[in-house]
Image: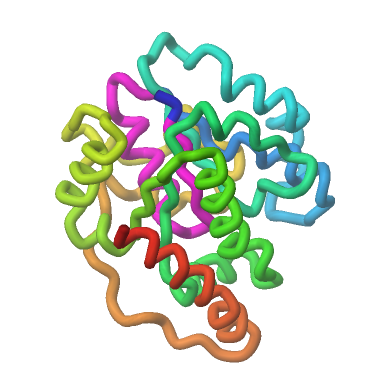
Amino acid sequence: MRLAMWSGPRNLSTAMMYAFGNRADFAAWDEPFYGPYLRQTGLDHPMAEEIKASRPEDAEEVQASLLGPIPDGKAHVYHKHMCQHMIDGVPRDFMADCVNVFLLRHPARVVASFMKGYPQATAADIGFAKQAELFAHCEALGQSPVVIDSADIRANPEAALRDLCDRISLDWDPAVLAWPEGPKPFDGVWATHWYASVWGSTGFAGAEGPLPDLEGRAKQLAEDAMPFYELMTARAKN
């Protein structure tokens, strides 16, 4: 199985990669298209030059690798994708050969977290519109993608992940509920900037508290993302 997990930033995406990467039958790949995305957009992300140097492939080469042999002789591979990386010029043909799952988080939480590390964030950077677009693309392929909310996973990791595995016809493995503390061999080079909190974890954190209070541009950014989030949460209930 090629399990493609689609989210924006700060969506529990790294913890989910650690969860599946902890299974003996899974390899993991962290944000495959990040290098091509930065080269095509010229965005000045934290560690941009290091990221581009570590990911020299063009987008077509990345796609070929996604469809190639699964690393390390594993039965399955987990692809942690960022929706916002799927700009014009980044191919999508590989999605037809993947089990595509969409991971959600409330926009206010995403914006509050992401802007701590990237204060100039825009709507395109947090990926909500692109996530809805990619879901529609999967439907056009004749797929019925699973949609999950990070809040449900944090509230009851075992129940949520058992349900996910059942819905994608994957055998349950309790290894997804805990992982070793510290960096992982499949982390992208950007991990030193973004992954400090998850490096200190050994499992999913508990349920989140009240939504953060946002002001100004951050508040507007979250409000603009809400229609796409609500569209996707409706899909999660199907």
Does the stretch in magenta take in 21?
A: yes
Instruction: Identify the colour scheme used.
Output: rainbow
Percent x, y for residue 235? Answer: 39, 60
Identify the image quadrant of the C terminus.
Answer: bottom left
- Position of 185 relative to 4 (above/below): above
The residue lying at 53 percent from left, 69 percent from top is 228
What range of the chain is rendered magenta?
3-26
Does the stretch in magenta take in 153?
A: no
Percent x, y for residue 105? Answer: 42, 64
Residue 135 is left or right of residue 55, and the answer is: left
View extreme (top): residue = 73
**Residue 191 seen from this side:** no
- Position of 73 relative to 207 (above/below): above
Residue 232: image quadrant is bottom left
The residue lying at 26 percent from left, 52 percent from top is 204
Residue 134 is left or right of residue 150, and the answer is: right
Percent x, y for residue 88? Answer: 77, 47
**Residue 125 seen from this side:** yes
The residue lying at 76 percent from left, 46 percent from top is 38
- Position of 35 relative to 237 (above/below): above
Identify the image quadrant of the N terminus.
Answer: top left
The residue lying at 50 percent from left, 74 percent from top is 112
Residue 183: image quadrant is top left
Residue 104: image quadrant is bottom left
Task: Tally the marks.
Answer: 0
View extreme (bottom): residue = 216
- Position of 140 relative to 106 (above/below): above
Taking depth in this image into account, of 200 and 70 the one nearest to the observer is 70
Percent x, y for residue 74? Answer: 38, 14
